[in-house]
Amino acid sequence: MYIALIVILILAALILFSIIFMQAAPVFGGTISKKRRGELNRSKNFADGKFVNQIPTFMNMGLKENISTLRDFMKKGGHREPDAPIPVETYVLGNGEGGTRITWFGHSAFLMELDGKVILIDPMFGNVPSPFPMIGGRRYSSRLPIEIKDLPKIDIVLLSHNHYDHLDYGTILKIKNKVDQFITPLGVGTNLEKWGVTKEKISEHDWWDEVKVDNLKFVCTPARHFSGRSLLDRNSSLWCSWVINGQNSKIFFSGDSGYAPHFKEVGEKYGPFDVTLMECGQYDKRWAAIHMVPEESVQAHLDVKGKVMIPIHWGAFTLALHSWTDPVERASKAAKERGVVLATPRIGETVELDSFEYPSSFWWRVL
C-alpha cells in the first residue's frame, strides 16, 4: 500500500510539473482565455468546448495503438529518410512584374508571389518539428532555399493550424517583424500573441469566411484534421484549408486533411483552380481519417477541379512509417492513371504558373 501511494504521488507530481511547464514554456503557445472560448462558441464548428470536423473523424490512437506506433518507429529500415541531405535550390525573389510564382520550402511551407504580394504559407523553417530539439527527426536538407534573415518583407503569412510542423515558434520569432499581416483559423492567433505578434497584425477566421487584402481574396475553407500543441489544448483552435484568389490565378492549399466531402464542396463553390498544393504524406492506417494517402490526394485534386497539382507534406521530415519517397511515387503513378498534371519541384525551385511547362523530373530517384 505504501509503495503504491508513493508511485501515485510521483505520477501526480510529474503530471503537475508537465502542466506547469507547458503553460510556462513559450514554445507550446498561448492559452485560450475563458472569454475567448466564449467567443469561439459562436462558431457552428465548435461544440462542447472543442472544434469538430464536418463528418465524424476518429483516430485509432488508444494505448494499444500508441504502443504499436512507438514500437514501429523504433524499428530500423524502410528507407524512411534519405541517405544523404537532399539538394536545395537557392531562391531568388522575382521582380514583381511577372505572373504568379510559387516556391516550395519542403513539407507544407511555401513562398508565393502573387499580384505584387509576398505570401508565406505554413512557414515551418526550423530543423525539427517538435517542441524539444532533441526529439523528432531532423530536416532532410542541410539548408533552406534562403536564409530567414534574407527573406524580403512579407505581406501575408497564411496558417492552416497549430501543429509543430506547420506553426513553428522559432520561425515566427525570426519573421514577425518582417510580416504585415497573419491570417489564421480561429484560435491560432493566441499562439502568435504569446510570441509577441501584435493583435493588429492578426486576423482569425471560421470556415467559409472570405478575407479581402487589396486585390486578393482568401477563403478559410474546411479540412478534416485536428489541432493541439500540448496535453490540454486538443481541438481548442480550428484547422483549415485555404482558397487563394488573385487577379489572374486561383490556388487551393489543402492544409492537413483526411479525404472528405469538403473537397467537392470547395470545388463547386470556388473552383476551378490553376494549381493545388495538396497534402500527400505522413499517412498511416491508424490515422487514415486525418491524413490522405496519395491516391486520395489525387482524387481531392480532381474534386476541387484543379489544373496542376503539387504534392506537399513530404520531402522534409519523417512523421510516419512509409519510405520518404512513397508519397511522391504513388502520387505520380495515380496522377498518370487519372490524367492529372503533376508538378514535382525540387525544394527551392520556383513554379511559374504562367508557364506551360512545370517541373516534372524524378529528382528524388537520383540522390
Image (cartoon, rainbow, N blue to C red):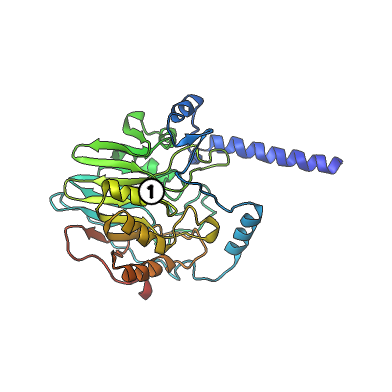
Give left or right: position of 231 versus 95.
right
Residue at numbered disc 1: 262
Residue 256, percent from left and from top: 42, 51
Residue 138's x, y, as percent?
Answer: 47, 58
| Image quarter hosting the C terminus | bottom left
Whether residue 274 is visible here, answered yes or no, is: yes
Quarter of the figure that contains the N terminus? top right
Taking the spot 51% from the left edge, 43% from the top edge, the residue there is 229
Q: Is residue 367 visible?
A: no
Residue at left 66%, top 36%? 16
Asked which quadrant contains residue 333, the reply is bottom left
Q: Is residue 227 left or right of residue 97?
A: right
Give percent across and percent down for residue 142. 39, 61
How far from the left and from the top, in percent, is residue 186? Answer: 41, 36
Residue type indicated by callout 1: His
Instruction: Give the secondary structure at mark 1.
Output: helix
Identity of the residue drawn at 20% across and 52% down: 100
- Residue 234 is left or right of residue 329, and the answer is right
Q: Is residue 228 above or below residue 337?
A: above
